Image (cartoon, helix red, strand yellow):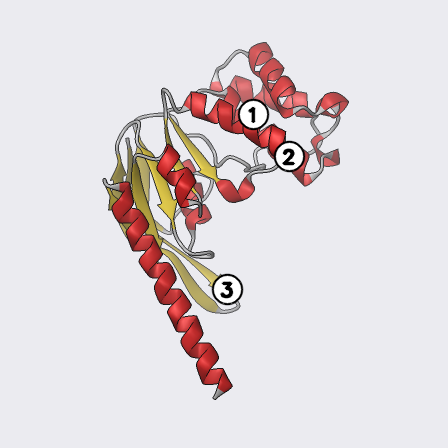
Amino acid sequence: MIRLENVSKTFWVRGEPRVVADGISATFPTGARVGLMGVNGVGKSSLLSMIAGTLQPDSGSVTSDGTISWPVGFRGSFHRDLTGAQNIRFIARIYGVDTDELSDFVEDFAELGAQYHQPFRSYSSGMRSRLSFGVSMGIRFDTYLVDEATSVGDAVFKTKSRRVFMDRMQSGGAVYVSHSMGKLRQLCTMGAVLDQGHLHVYDDLEEAIAHYQAILEQALGSRADDDDADDD
């Protein structure tokens, strides 16, 4: 179970406040697969980071009675001067898992070749994401945090990643960010919509999708009105 209690977070952008969480309180049940929706820039990635503990809220708290992954694709936990293999072994010791087993899994999964034993600072953005996704899948978490915007790799690698991720979902939950309603319907058991700092949670995924689509239609309508005004 993941519980958010009165969570607030504001960023200042060019001197203007941008509220991504305005006293959010919500509970995600154990094993739930939550589809997190919202328009671009609303703060979905920031909310994931607060759930993971890599970003602190201004006020309020996030608690859980299980283990939570960092957001898949997040690369802030890697030391730039260590090799990929050394980073993975370090993470294995932190999480108390077998170092050889995790290292072997990530080396095979990430498909980095000899670069796996080179310093992390030499990796491309795609290679860093492969390493991050590999270690996320190599450690068994109760809840996985996934932002589809961070997905990388060619079609073959994406297919392999999805297959492993779906295997993890047999025994775990997820908070999954995507703009694809098809993928959310295939994966998720409930939904949540982040809008103007407020999180609306629905046990029925279709209700969440309907809410999100209404927001999109309203945004498109407002944009069309603005375009008409400009034409005038």
Residue indicated by mark 2: 154
Q: Nearer the viewer, residue 70 or 230?
A: 230
Q: What numbered label is drawn on residue 13?
A: 3
**Residue at coordinates 54% horizontally, 38% vertically from top-left?**
74
Residue indicated by mark 1: 160
Q: How crowded is mark 3: few (under 14 residues within 10 Å), some or many (20 or more)?
A: few
The vertical placement of 201 against 118, above or below, is: below
* Sequence-wise first label, 2 or 3: 3
Q: Which of 79 and 143 is in front in this view?
A: 143
Name the kind of residue labelled 3 in the image: Val
Q: Is any part of residue 196 visible from this angle? A: no
**Residue at coordinates 43% horizontally, 22% vertically from top-left?**
168
Residue 49, percent from left and from top: 45, 42
Residue 13, percent from left and from top: 50, 64
* Sequence-wise first label, 1 or 3: 3
Q: In which quarter of the image is residue 76?
A: top right
Frontmost of labels 1 and 3 is 1
Give the structural element (helix, strand or loop) at label 3: strand
